[in-house]
Image (spheres, rainbow, N blue to C red):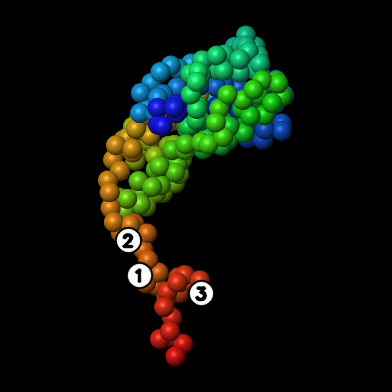
Amino acid sequence: MPSEFVFAFMDCEFGGLDLEIHDITEVGVIFTDYRLVELSEQQWRVKARPERISDEAAAIFGYDEELWSEAPPIRQVLEEITALAPKGKVVVPAGQNVRMDVAFLERAFRNCGIPYPFDYHVIDLATLFYAWSLVVDEPARALSLRQAATTAGLLGDGGVAHRALADARLTLETFRYYVGRLAPRDLAEVVPTAADRPADEVGPDSGADTTDSIA
């Protein structure tokens, strides 16, 4: 039943993009029910090892070594995330390119010996944005949060904040926008059949009738 699902709209900031050599530096989570009604939210700075934060990443999310030195360790943050997650529900990670966040979090939970509290499925804004672009016949120029939010008219002049909770909230609001604007269309209008595509785009296994061309 849908009511068994809740979503964890999440965003993490990292010391870089390589989970083998970089640390999580910030986590933001907004829990919603299956209708996207908000249940709770929280943001954590995470005490990270300075040598596992690249200069480029530090500039993006505004790293301050003194400020981050007072942050809780990753184990405490993971325990608090688990405590905040709704009980007795299937908690599905949701976000923008959320597989990256999941990869870092899975590794952190495993390294700390804490059971992973989320489902193995994920819900990604990029997929919804691309589906919307097909429905309205407006080609997606990119699959980023910046592009999805800008197209929805939800991103101001300041751009994406690159702060965990702010980006999680922007993702949730953008997700709601596109869910509310998906309208039914005939499948053939969205995905052309083989017969409608140019001959040079139709492969031998497409199912198109090529009898006349080889007779």
Looking at the rendered image, the quarter that the C terminus falls into is: bottom left
- The alpha-carbon separation of the residues under discs 2 and 1 comes to 9 Å
Looking at the image, can residue 157 be seen?
no
- The residue wearing badge 3 is 204
Q: Earlier in the sequence, mark 2 or mark 1?
A: 2
Of residues 90 and 12, the one nearer the viewer is 90
Residue 65, placed above or below residue 89:
above
- Say what amino acid the circle numbered 1 marks: Asp
| Res. 127 image quadrant | top left
Of residues 199 and 207, the one nearer the viewer is 207
- The residue wearing badge 2 is 188
Looking at the image, can residue 6 be seen?
yes
* Circle 2 SS class: helix
- The residue wearing badge 1 is 196
Q: Earlier in the sequence, mark 2 or mark 3?
A: 2
- The alpha-carbon separation of the residues under discs 3 and 1 comes to 15 Å
Disc 1 crowd, CA 10 A, few/some/many (<14, 14-19, 20+) = few
CB within 8 Å, label 2 to label 1:
yes
Residue 44, placed above or below residue 141:
above
